[in-house]
Image (cartoon, helix red, strand yellow):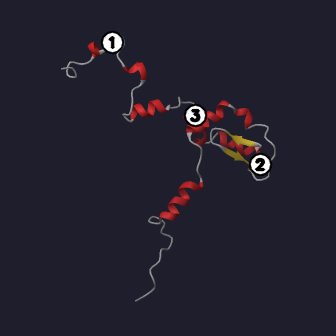
Amino acid sequence: MGKCQRRKNNTAGNKRQRKACGTKRRIKDVDQVIDDAKHPEKFFGQEKDDALPGQGQFYCIQCARYFISEDAIKTHFGTKEHKKRLRRSKEKAYTQEEADFCAGLGRRGKSSVAAGSTGPAAAPKAMTK
């Protein structure tokens, strides 16, 4: 009765389409950008590469993008996207120790213990028997 049922232009339930779009424009994470910003000299003065936009000569470290010309990168520096990435890259990077502490897997070194209190005498009374 009628035409066969097939998916037309509806990508909401198409798992393959979602996965392809999610990884197509993958950008570097903030911690990777912070590492790159520590050594900016490796991104400037690169050899010309025909496979990259602008032959790889115009690169934004914070956004991890190549641009086709100097005018294009100057315009990019004024965009909201660049300013957000710049602000996030100036923040202090999280360490694995902090991530474990927030997940409840460990302690944050000696700073988590109250200053001046050490040993079992400093433990709360509910914990001791």
1 or 3: tag closer to the N-terminus: 3
Q: Position of residue 84 (x, y in %)?
A: 56, 38
Question: Type of residue at label 3?
Answer: Ser
Does any portion of residue 127 appear in the rendered image? yes
Name the element at disc 3: helix
- Residue 19 sits above or below residue 42 on the image: below
- In this view of the protein, which residue sits in the foreground, 54 or 81? 54
Question: How crowded is the residue under tag 1: few (<14 C-alpha within 10 Å), some, or many (20+)?
Answer: few
- Judging by the rendered image, the residue that carries numbered circle 3 is 89
The answer to whether residue 3 is above or below residue 124 is below
Q: Is residue 122 above or below residue 14?
A: above
At label 2, the amino acid type is Gly
User: What residue is at 46 percent from the left and 30 percent from the top?
Assistant: 97
Q: Which residue is mark 1?
A: 117
**Tag 1, which secondary structure?**
loop
Badge nearest the viewer, 2 or 1:
1
Along the polypeptide, which appears first: circle 2 or circle 1? 2
How far is the residue under mark 2 from the one under mark 3?
25 Å
What percent of the width, then of the height, locates residue 3? 45, 85
Residue 13 image position (x, y, % from top left)? 44, 66
Where residue 36 sits: x, y (%)? 65, 35
Judge left or right: residue 103 versus residue 43. left
Relative depth, front residue between 124 and 44: 124
Work out how far the residue at label 1 is from the one at label 3, CA to CA, in angstroms. 37 Å
Residue where numbered disc 2 is placed: 54
